């Protein structure tokens, strides 16, 4: 009897997974990480544009470097936190639930 057939199928004989699904998930992950710098760049540009409009309307002239640095730090840390939360939620949804031990 061939032992490799037992590793490729589950206990009920069904296939455990597909290479196509794995490649699709890998493609989504690579695309997400490839687009992430552009999303952060757009968010930073939006922040600077709004900051420039507010400074132009408000009293006083010139930029405040502390405000710009704090804004950049908040935006990048927000994206890092959102990425961590998304990974946590995806990992939690992909992890199979534990079953209670049967009482017999």
Image (cartoon, helix red, strand yellow):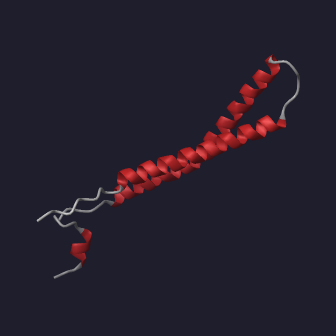
Residue nearer the viewer, 71 or 29: 71
Residue at x 70% of width, y 43% of height: 73
Residue at x 22% of width, y 74% of height: 5
**Residue 72: percent from left, percent from top:** 72, 40
The answer to whether 31 is drawn above or below residue 6 in the figure is above
Q: Is residue 34 left or right of residue 4?
A: right
The answer to whether 65 is drawn above or below residue 29 in the figure is above
Q: Is residue 73 left or right of residue 1?
A: right
Q: Quadrant of the C terminus?
A: bottom left
Q: Would residue 32 be seen by someone viewing this image from the given angle? A: no
Residue at x 52% of width, y 53% of height: 30
Q: Is residue 40 left or right of residue 13?
A: right
Q: Quadrant of the N terminus?
A: bottom left
Residue nearer the viewer, 96 or 99: 99
Q: Would residue 97 be seen by someone viewing this image from the given angle? A: yes
Q: Is residue 86 left or right of residue 104?
A: right
**Residue 51: percent from left, percent from top:** 75, 27
Residue at x 20% of width, y 80% of height: 2
Residue nearer the viewer, 67 or 103: 103
**Residue 58: percent from left, percent from top:** 81, 18
User: Picture quarter containing residue 66?
Assistant: top right
């Amino acid at each position: 009897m061939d032992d490799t057939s037992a590793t490729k199928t589950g206990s009920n004989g069904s296939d455990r997974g597909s290479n196509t699904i794995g490649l699709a998930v890998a493609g989504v992950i690579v695309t997400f990480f490839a687009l992430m710098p552009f999303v952060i760049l757009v968010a930073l540009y939006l922040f600077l544009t709004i900051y420039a409009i507010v400074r132009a309307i408000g009293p006083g002239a010139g930029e405040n470097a502390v405000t710009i640095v704090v804004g950049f730090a908040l935006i990048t840390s927000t994206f890092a936190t959102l990425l961590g939360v998304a990974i946590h939620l995806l990992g939690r949804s992909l992890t199979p639930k534990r079953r209670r031990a049967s009482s017999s």
